Image (cartoon, grey):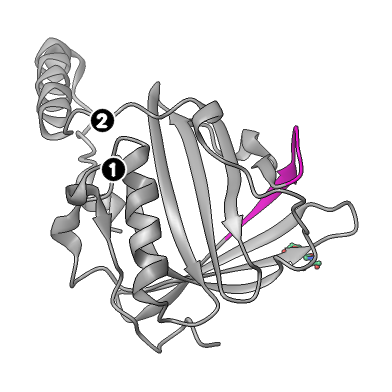
């Protein structure tokens, strides 16, 4: 994950007389930003995304390492640089999860905490307190497959600023998974329209994620 600050220029506030220039500049920056955003592969309809039958929310709890990552905004070019991160699911009394991801970035441990709220069927979730994320219009999580003790594949779809992003994570209880599980993951992500250019296997690390 790159630095968001570096990607989003903040144009300085213009004196009123230069407002037209500022607006022109802003337009130019936006055009540039759009040009540098590759066309996104469309997200598949949820109907095309399998759901783990008889999902057991208590067994899914605990720490998962992100062993594989694929998505329409994921670039294979980061392979070799993209560090492994972990995501921990903690069940609350109302059967929502506290979801904490830990990333090692810029020599620090970064924590991301959010809530996944059960939605239409077991294994499917939406983002809790979505109002706290003004740019997010919708967010869907679906556990595609898991055996709870070894691996899981989870599908995420997010509509943000009118763009539809989707990603699939291959989770492992350990930092390594068998070649067969990785191949299944690749096959599945391709069935959703992604190509090898959109699949990467993060580099295993120890810092932060082993806490
Ligand atoms: C969930 O997160 C909230 C806020 O960080 C915390 O107060 C609460 O104890 C957590 N609950 C569980 C079950 O982890």
Q: Which residue is at the far front?
A: 180
Is residue 163 shown left or right of residue 157?
A: left
Give the answer, above or below, for where 64 lies relative to 112. below
Residue found at x 60% / y 61%:
146
State the residue position of label 1: 73
Region rendered in magenta: 113-122
Q: Is residue 119 magenta?
A: yes
Q: Identify the secondary structure beneath mark 1.
A: loop
Quarter of the rendering containing residue 1:
bottom left
Q: Secondary structure at mark 2?
A: loop
Residue 141, located in which quarter of the rendered image? top right
How far apart are the two marked residues, 2 and 1, measured between alpha carbons? 7 Å
Left or right for 119, reference 78: right
Instruction: Work out whether residue 117 or residue 114 is closer to the camera in this orientation and state it.
Output: 117
Residue 158 position within the rendered picture, expressed as x and y whole percent measured from the top left: 48, 35
Q: Mark 2 sits on what residue?
A: 40
């Amino acid at each position: 994950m790159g630095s968001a600050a570096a990607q989003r220029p903040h144009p300085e506030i213009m004196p009123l007389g230069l407002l037209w220039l500022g607006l022109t500049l802003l337009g130019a920056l936006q055009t540039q930003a759009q040009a540098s955003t590759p066309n996104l592969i469309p997200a598949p309809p949820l109907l095309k995304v399998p759901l783990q039958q008889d999902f057991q929310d208590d067994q899914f709890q605990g720490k998962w390492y992100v062993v594989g990552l694929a998505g329409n905004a994921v670039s294979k070019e980061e392979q070799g640089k993209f560090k492994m991160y972990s995501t921990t699911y903690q069940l609350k009394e109302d059967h929502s999860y506290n979801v904490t991801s830990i990333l090692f970035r810029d020599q620090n441990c970064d924590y991301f905490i959010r809530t996944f709220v059960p939605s239409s069927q077991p294994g499917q979730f939406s983002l809790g307190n979505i109002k706290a994320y003004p740019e997010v219009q919708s967010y869907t999580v679906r556990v595609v497959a898991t055996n709870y003790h070894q691996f899981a594949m989870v599908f995420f779809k997010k509509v943000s600023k009118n763009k539809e992003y989707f990603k699939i994570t291959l989770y492992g209880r350990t930092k390594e998974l068998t070649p067969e599980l990785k191949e299944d993951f690749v096959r599945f992500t391709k069935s959703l329209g992604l190509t090898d250019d959109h699949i990467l296997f993060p580099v295993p690390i120890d810092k932060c994620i082993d806490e």
